[in-house]
Image (tube, grey):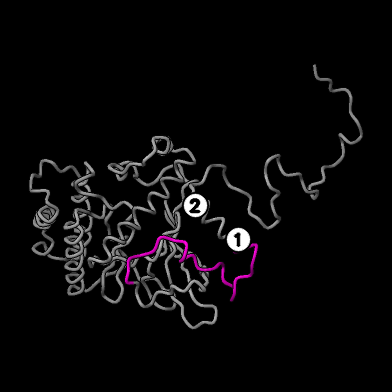
Amino acid sequence: MRRYDRFTDSDFDEPDFDRPRPAPRGRRPRFDDEPEPTRRGRLTEHERTRLARLRADAYTETVPGGADHWSTWGDAEQGPAPHPAWLVTELAAVDTDLGVLKTGKEADVHLLRRGLPDGSASCLLAAKRYRGDEHRLFHRDTGYLEGRRMRRSREMRAMSRRTTFGRNLIAEQWAAAEFAALRRLWPIGVPVPYPVQRDGTELLLEFVGEQDGTAAPRLAQLRPAPAELRDLWHQLTAALELLAAEGLCHGDLSAYNVLVHDGRLVLIDLPQVVDLVVNPSGAGYLDRDVRTIASWFAARGLPDDVVNVTGLLDDLRRAAGLGLDRARFEP
């Protein structure tokens, strides 16, 4: 039995909060300026490697020009060639984070400047960083992940149970899926941002906006005149036909994930792009995409003879090789 009647003067001393505490057994000591870890859990191998590189930049060498770190271009999965002329690909370039453009449930988007230290070349990029460990669920991911399988049953179990490791795997899978979709769609002329690179759960994409860092507005923010509204509708249907010809649909299309820059429409947020054949609910996602975006155009005054949902769906199903058996399609 434990005795509580044997105390010393030190038992009543005020605690010394300024005294450094010894690191737990088996862990390295934490530096004063290093953030406290928010949650325990295994990272994926790619993410562990990426973070190690960033730490090396931060602790071993001063990055020129006050930038955050050296360019990760040489270590990342790169976008399709030929690379655009505006893109800085020199390994001597540095990256500077200019702040948050958008926050979301699955990812945050930052504005990034990549340039040479002497200022001779630079470009603006959108850095989309998927989060896994901080979130229990990804937005409606169960349906979108149908038809996608990991090689190892252990990884599939971790994802289905939403363990910390499983959520990190899902984050990396979303990033890989979006990058693969953009690499596939950009060369065939689908209006999407150029996919610069993927490094673990971070995507670097073409920044759609002005040179001063002002992002292009979303379609939902606009009140276009009748002629512009009609032109944007025709641009959109052409983009959907290109997707359908590849056997794909956006999967979560709305006026909030379409940008308009200099009169040109750009589709964004494609991690959930759906294979219309492999995914058993693919036709339902196509139907929902068309009806959701068509309702926005109709509400802005586009005539019914232009917004022909039934005719557009028939055209897209033919392009995707699905046929016209509407009984198969559940929204």
Please tell me whether mark 2 sits on a helix, a strand or a loop: helix
- Disc sitting over residue 95 in the figure: none
Q: Nearer the viewer, residue 174 or 7?
A: 174
Q: Which residues are magenta?
A: 56-82
Is residue 166 shown above or below 73?
Answer: above
Quarter location, residue 195: bottom left
Q: Quadrant of the N terminus?
A: top right
Give the SS element for disc 1.
helix
Query: What crowding class fits label 2: few (fewer than 14 Cα within 10 Å), some (14-19), or many (20 or more)?
Result: some
Residue 263: % across, % down? 26, 75
- Image position, residue 148 (x, y; %): 31, 44
Q: Position of residue 222 (x, y in %)?
A: 29, 69
Q: Which mark is residue 56?
A: 1
Going by the numbered disc 1, the residue's amino acid type is Ala
Look at 71% across and 49% down and name the residue there.
Answer: 29
| Badge 2 amino acid | Glu
Tag 1–tag 2 contact (CB < 8 Å):
no
Residue at the right extreme of this rendering: 9
Q: Which residue is mark 2?
A: 47
Residue 129 at least partly seen: no
Residue plotted at (22% across, 54% down) = 249
Q: Is residue 60 above or below residue 152?
A: below
For the C terminus, the image quarter is top left
Q: Is residue 6 magenta?
A: no
Q: Is residue 303 left or right of residue 165?
A: left
Quadrant in the rendering for residue 11:
top right
